[in-house]
Image (cartoon, rainbow, N blue to C red):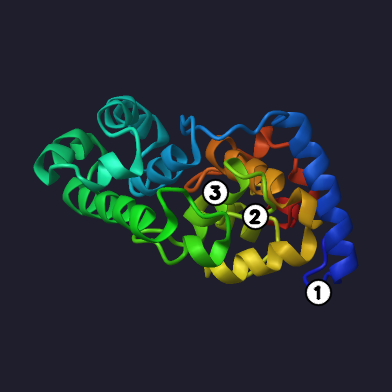
């Protein structure tokens, strides 16, 4: 029985069990976006807004062949860039953002992707989620990325009550050991995509059922 006023220590020990179970069901929570460099991951993550990772992966091979560096992307012809990005939706805005992003990397960071959250957040089109994805997956730094899946699964599991991504991140950061932030967020995200679906969570085949207040009562 999971009490509504569950203490922090009980919640932490429940989360340890949740993470153990997720580690068994999702042993390799690899990011689904294809990338070879931090620059490619940064751009791909910006492009993944409002579309699927698969769609981004169809576009980025051509994009990075045409514009392999921030310098090349900064000098891109906007209409040509728009055509390449068209399948990802909102392509005009994304073309402007990615070009501005490349210009900022060139002018302020010598063409390199910065490795600090506060620097990443100064880049056009880069919010905390994108910055955290890059910090963890490109630079192997502890970071919690809260997208719609991580937020929803965390609320259903009673790890947070907030719908604000920043507050969800803070709540998870208090519960999860820092060295596990990225891997735990990756598994919560994939669990949300595969099992704890938005409209109809597949509780009958979820290994977390005994640990989940959403189905406990
Ligand atoms: S038991 Fe249901 S609501 Fe809880 S995490 Fe699993 S799928 Fe989501």
Helix, strand or loop under label 1: loop
- Residue 7 lies, in percent from the top left, at 86, 71
Q: Mark 2 vs ligand 1: CB under 8 Å?
A: no
Which residue is identified by label 3? Answer: 133
Q: Residues within 10 Å of mark 3 (few under 14, many from 20)?
A: many
The residue shown at (47%, 47%) is 199
Identify the mark nearer the N-term, 1 or 2. 1
Q: Residues within 10 Å of mark 2 (few under 14, many from 20)?
A: many
Which residue is identified by label 2? Answer: 143
- Labelled pair 2, 3 in contact (Cβ < 8 Å): yes
- Residue 156 lies, in percent from the top left, at 64, 56
Count the labels in the image. 3
Helix, strand or loop under label 3: helix
Helix, strand or loop under label 2: loop
Which residue is identified by label 1? Answer: 5
Taking 101 as reference, is 190 left or right? right
Task: Inspect this view and state whether residue 1 appears.
Answer: no
In the image, 5 versus 71, the foreground residue is: 71
In the image, 27 versus 14, the foreground residue is: 27
């Amino acid at each position: 029985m999971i009490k509504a006023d569950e203490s922090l220590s009980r919640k932490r020990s429940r989360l340890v069990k949740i993470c153990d179970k997720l580690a068994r069901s999702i042993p390799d929570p690899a990011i689904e976006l294809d990338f070879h460099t931090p620059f490619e991951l940064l751009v791909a993550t910006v492009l993944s807004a409002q579309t699927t990772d698969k769609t981004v992966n169809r576009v980025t091979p051509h994009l990075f062949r045409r514009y392999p560096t921030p310098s090349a992307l900064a000098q891109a012809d906007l209409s040509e860039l728009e055509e390449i990005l068209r399948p990802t939706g909102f392509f005009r805005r994304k073309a402007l953002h990615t070009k501005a992003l490349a210009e900022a990397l060139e002018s302020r960071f010598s063409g390199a992707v910065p490795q600090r959250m506060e620097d990443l957040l100064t880049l056009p089109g880069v919010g905390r989620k994108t910055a955290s994805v890059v910090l963890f997956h490109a630079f192997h730094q502890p970071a919690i990325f809260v997208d719609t899946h991580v937020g929803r699964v965390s609320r259903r599991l009673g790890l947070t009550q907030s719908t604000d991504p920043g507050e969800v991140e803070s709540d998870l950061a208090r519960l999860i050991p820092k060295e596990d932030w990225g891997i735990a967020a990756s598994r919560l995200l994939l669990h949300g995509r595969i099992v704890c679906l938005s409209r109809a969570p597949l509780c009958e085949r979820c290994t977390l059922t005994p640990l989940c207040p959403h189905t406990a009562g």
